């Protein structure tokens, strides 16, 4: 079984499930209360090993609900929060948009590129440079422009 599967249907269903729960505070709170170290760990193990044990179709079917539970159910799991709040993972989170923008160039299958691929180890460096040189200056410019527009009453 391929580990590099991707299904747009599952991706869209995960987004829809997340949006639905985000709009329903009661559901979000219920998921948070259900999230304990045991329930969250079982859900994470199922997400990782489920395709091997139950088959890919079963996991694809439950993935939208599973993804929403992993996201909201993990909010009260202290160990998980400590891990996610660690400086290395915070840095990855800060660079996530830049990593997303550049990842295809570094991680695409060789047949999808005209030339040879750049070494994947350069991806974090390029993403960090993109964050510092492009993303942050653009964000600062956007804030200045927004303040100017607000000051003009536009």
Image (spheres, rainbow, N blue to C red):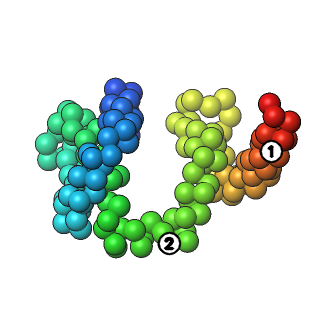
The quadrant holding residue 152 is top right
Coordinates of residue 128 in the picture (x, y in percent): 69, 56
- Mark 1 vs mark 2, CA separation in Å: 33 Å
Residue shown at the point (26%, 45%) measured from the top left: 27
Residue shown at the point (31%, 67%) measured from the top left: 77
For label 1, the residue is 147
Residue shown at the point (32%, 60%) measured from the top left: 74
Which quadrant holds the N terminus?
top left
Instruction: Judge whether residue 108 can be spotted in this image.
Output: yes
Instruction: Judge whether residue 14 can be spotted in this image.
Output: no
97 sits to left or right of 125? left
Coordinates of residue 148 in the picture (x, y in percent): 85, 41
Coordinates of residue 70 in the picture (x, y in percent): 30, 53
Front-most of residues 23 and 117 = 23
Vertical order, 142 against 92 (above or below): above
56 sits to left or right of 2? left
Front-most of residues 50 and 75 = 75
Front-most of residues 47 and 71 = 71
Mark 1 or mark 2: whose residue is earlier in sequence: 2
For label 2, the residue is 86
Vertical order, 20 against 119 (above or below): above
Q: Nearer the viewer, mark 1 or mark 2?
A: 1
Which quadrant holds the C terminus?
top right
Helix, strand or loop status at disc 1: helix
């Amino acid at each position: 079984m391929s580990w590099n599967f991707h299904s747009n249907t599952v991706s869209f269903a995960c987004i829809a499930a997340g949006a639905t729960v985000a709009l329903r505070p009661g559901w979000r709170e219920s998921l948070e209360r259900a999230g304990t170290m045991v329930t969250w760990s079982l859900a994470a193990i199922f997400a990782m090993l489920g395709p091997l044990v139950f088959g890919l179709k079963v996991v694809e079917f439950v993935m939208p609900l599973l993804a929403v539970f992993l996201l909201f159910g993990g909010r009260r799991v202290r160990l998980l929060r400590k891990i996610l709040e660690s400086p290395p993972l915070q840095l990855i989170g800060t660079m996530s948009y830049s990593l997303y923008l550049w990842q295809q160039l570094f991680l695409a299958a060789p047949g999808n590129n005209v030339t040879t691929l750049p070494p994947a180890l350069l991806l974090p460096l390029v993403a960090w440079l993109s964050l510092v040189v492009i993303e942050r200056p653009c964000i600062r410019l956007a804030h200045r422009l927004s303040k100017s527009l607000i000051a003009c009453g536009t």
